[in-house]
């Protein structure tokens, strides 16, 4: 089922995130204790915090630089915009689809008009 695989993926993601969190904490503690062998504990704590802050800044700059290159043009047409919405913001797209479905269920005539507008061929005459 789709639900079971989604739950399994969510659990696997949570476990991986927890393991990464514990690994980062352990790395920080190890670095701190290694530095206390060489200097005062206050200086070791400051250097450990500085190193982790530098790593965070480098990671943020790398991801922001990568995001600049991945910018796309604005999609044209209603279908392309809907596809872009579902691709970029799946929760917002799902909420829009549910709201649209609710509106169409409440007013079937509106659903008929929208379906007719999408399936209607061009108004130009052919000769």
Image (cartoon, rainbow, N blue to C red):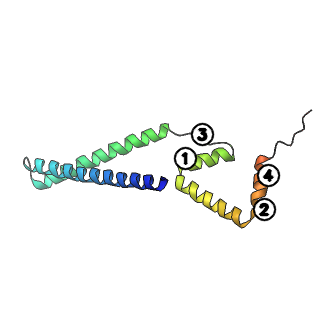
How much space separates mark 3 and mark 4, taking CA atoms? 29 Å
How much space separates mark 1 and mark 2, taking CA atoms? 30 Å
- Which circle's residue, 2 or 4, is located before the other in the chain? 2
> Of the numbered discs in the image, which one, if any, rests on residue 116?
4
Residue at 77%, 47% in the rendered image: 119
Could you classify mark 4 by the number of other residues whose Cα lies within 10 Å: few (under 14), some (14-19), or many (20 or more)?
Answer: few
Closer to the camera, 108 or 95?
Answer: 108
Query: Looking at the image, is mark 1 or mark 2 nearer the viewer?
Result: 2
* x and y percentages locating residue 101 in the rendered image: 66, 60
The residue wearing badge 1 is 87
The residue wearing badge 2 is 109
Query: Looking at the image, is mark 2 or mark 3 nearer the viewer?
Result: 2
Residue at 74%, 65% in the rendered image: 107
The residue wearing badge 3 is 73
- Which circle's residue, 2 or 3, is located before the other in the chain? 3
* x and y percentages locating residue 91 in the rendered image: 53, 56
Kindly indicate whether the residue at mark 4 contacts the one at mark 1 (C-beta within 8 angstroms).
no
* x and y percentages locating residue 94 in the rendered image: 57, 56
Seen in the image, is 99 located left or right of residue 20?
right
Could you classify mark 2 by the number of other residues whose Cα lies within 10 Å: few (under 14), some (14-19), or many (20 or more)?
Answer: few
Query: Looking at the image, is mark 1 or mark 3 nearer the viewer?
Result: 1
User: Dividing the image into 4 quarters, which one contains the C terminus?
Assistant: top right
């Amino acid at each position: 089922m789709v639900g079971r695989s989604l739950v399994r993926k969510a659990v696997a993601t949570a476990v991986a995130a927890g393991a990464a969190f514990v690994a980062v904490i352990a790395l920080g503690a190890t670095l701190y204790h290694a530095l206390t062998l060489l200097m005062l504990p206050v200086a070791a704590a400051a250097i450990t915090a500085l190193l982790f802050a530098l790593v965070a800044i480098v990671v943020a700059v790398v991801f922001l630089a990568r995001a600049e290159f991945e910018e796309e043009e604005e999609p044209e047409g209603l279908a392309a915009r809907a596809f872009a919405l579902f691709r970029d913001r799946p929760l917002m797209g799902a909420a829009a689809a549910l709201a649209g479905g609710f509106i169409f269920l409440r007013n079937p005539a509106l659903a008929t008009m929208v379906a007719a507008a999408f399936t209607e061929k061009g108004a130009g005459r052919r000769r």
